[in-house]
Amino acid sequence: MKSTLRIDFLGTGTSQGVPVIGCECEVCTSSNPKDKRLRTSIAIKKGNTQIVIDSGPDFRQQILRAKIKQLDALVFTHEHKDHISGMDDIRAFNYLQQEPIQLYCTLQVLKALEREYHYVFDEKYSYPGIPQVETNLITKETSFQIGEMQLIPIEVMHLKLPVLGFRIDDFVYITDANYISDEEKLKLQGTKVLVIDALRKEKHISHFNLEEALELIREIAPKEAYIIHISHHMGLHDEVNSELPENVFLAYDGLILEI
């Protein structure tokens, strides 16, 4: 019997989060908790295996809020700061689990991590109290196993930057994209639950806008789809959500799916 996937949306906001510092728009001043968005990240659990995809600047807050006390691996989609800048806080899991945390990323992302966290990767800085990690390089060509999960990488483009989405069973997670090649779309066939980014309603240079995301959803035809990496320009959660097709939803921080 196939284990259930538990999907915990740790954050669903764009790089600035929502509310945006200093902004007085109706979204940023909304009292609806669903209009409060930390930077995009997701936790996935299958059986006894739990991973987190991306550790942005809100990572510590997200982990505490979700009461996550186990981390088998941290998987990175790409190297932008809103997706890697919380990695230092895996130290708590080193202490809890008494072992290094497994990192999964492309060579390009690893080089960025080595720059940003030189003290983690340079042996001359080695001392108790810094993150302990083991790196595992991944590419778009090869699936990989983490405990009870098999992950199939899906390369998407974020303007000119390659970003990896991931498929686990019939669940697909894609963030920071504005283009997916026909070859990579083949990996989406048969998806039952699709998570895809849509920054706002207006066109954007490096993210899908809402209509482009909806077009992709229509093409892939999942049973359900959820929108992430949402900016304050998208509009109020409840209003936008009510305008979407019946199988498409704006995700929100703290949303939990079991599939």
Image (tube, grey):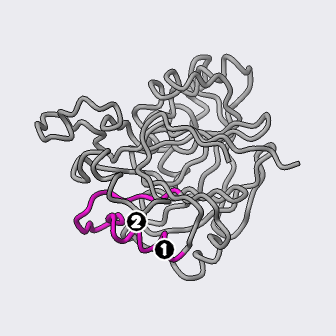
The tag on residue 218 is 1
Mark 1: secondary structure: helix
The residue shown at (51%, 34%) is 87
Which residue lies under the disc numbered 2?
158
Separation of disc 1 and disc 2 at Cα? Answer: 21 Å
Up the image or down, 233 lies above or below 258; here it is below
Residue 101: % across, % down: 67, 33
Residue drawn at 65 percent across, 22 percent down = 69
Instruction: Give whichever of 101, 112 is nearer the camera.
Output: 101
Upstream in the sequence, badge 1 or badge 2? Answer: 2
Residue 81: assigned label? none
218 is within the stretch colored magenta: yes
Which element carries disc 2, helix, strand or loop?
strand
Find out whether residue 158 is within the magenta segment: no
* Residue at 76% from the left image edge and 46% from the top image edge: 146
Residues shaded magenta: 195-219
